[in-house]
Image: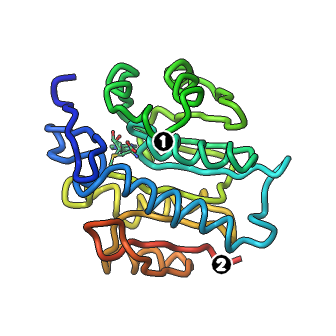
Amino acid sequence: MSHLQIVTTADGSNTIFNSEVGENYHSRHGALQESRHVFLESGLKYFLKVSPSGGDLEGAGAISILEVGFGTGLNFLLSAEYTIAQKIPLNYTGIEAYPLSPEMIAQTGYDQYIPKNLWQQFIKHYEEALQNPVQLDNCKLQIANCKLLDFSSSHKFDVIYFDAFAAIHQPEMWDDHAISHTLQFLKPGGVFVTYAITGNLKRIIKSLGLKVEKAPGAPGKREMLRAVKVE
Ligand SMILES: C[S@@+](CC[C@H](N)C(=O)[O-])C[C@H]1O[C@@H](n2cnc3c(N)ncnc32)[C@H](O)[C@@H]1O
């Protein structure tokens, strides 16, 4: 895919530049730092900290995450590493309209940030996860190969990672329709996080009845947005 190119970000970790969109998959200030800060720390770990009993964990104490824009899978890999270490079963659903090839994902070098066994299972089962749920250790992964607005599920999620390309490049991912479509999949008490914060986004999310807060941003960004669905 010639419009996709591996580039190195300020923390030394790689991302992918998509020349058709004119945008990187992660912050140029640091892909790994952004993923850890916005999604793992401010999303998943925050949810586990603030939720009664470490989250109203479903079934056998599992936590569920929905990601908009699965891309390279970096957010999944960091979340899976954490939940495996904590022995918390994870149900992870990614939505991805334009899946990367496993070869492209392998070029990111993200294997150096997670246990070897997790990486090997991920690369081996990635394409299958685009068709059916796959079990990687205690994580169930499914990637819905569709556009956000075509995604539907009877399931609701504890945490939503919203990782679309920036609004300047893909405004339709950030409008009222896209955000309310996404938030219908959040459980009461659930947490929505994204790396960006704008007045318009805050207004849309507040109008849907969620509690919105500014949280400290990843390096290179002052603030990010976190919202909690009031129970
Ligand atoms: C900022 S990148 C995501 C980065 C990703 N979370 C990662 O860690 O690699 C945005 C992603 O949204 C996907 N995308 C673009 N339009 C979409 C749509 N309408 N529905 C779902 N995904 C879309 C892109 O293909 C891209 O993978």
Task: Please tell me whether residue 35 is drawn above or below residue 37 in the rendered image.
Answer: above
Residue placed under numbered mark 1 in the picture: 95
Residue at 68% x, 46% y: name it. Answer: 85
Viewer-nearest residue: 198 or 185: 198
Question: Residue tagged by mark 2?
Answer: 230
- For ligand 1, give the image quadrant: top left
| Type of amino acid at the residue the image marks with label 2 | Val
Q: Nearer the viewer, residue 174 or 30?
A: 30
Q: Quadrant of residue 93?
A: top right
Q: Residue at x 48, y 72 (%)?
A: 226
Element under disc 2: loop
> 129 or 150: which is nearer to us?
129
Decide if residue 129 is on the left or right side of residue 165. Answer: right
Q: Tag 1: residue type?
A: Ile
As displayed, is residue 54 above or below residue 140? below
Q: Residue at x 58, y 30 (%)?
A: 118
**Residue 160 spot, x, y in % from top left:** 54, 57
The location of residue 71, given as percent across then percent down, is: 39, 38
Residue neighbourhood size for the residue with mark 1, other residues' Cα within 10 Å, grouped as few (<14), some (14–19), many (≥20)? many
Q: Of the two numbered discs 1 and 2 on the same chain, state the one appearing first in sequence.
A: 1
Residue 149 left/right relative to 128: left
Q: Say left or right for 200 vs 128.
A: left
Is the residue at mark 1 in contact range of ligand 1, meaning its CB lies under 8 Å from it? yes
| Quarter of the figure with residue 171 | bottom left
Structural distance between the alpha carbons of marks 1 and 2: 24 Å
The residue that appears at 49% across and 22% down in the rendered structure is 123
Image side of residue 120 versus residue 48, left or right: left
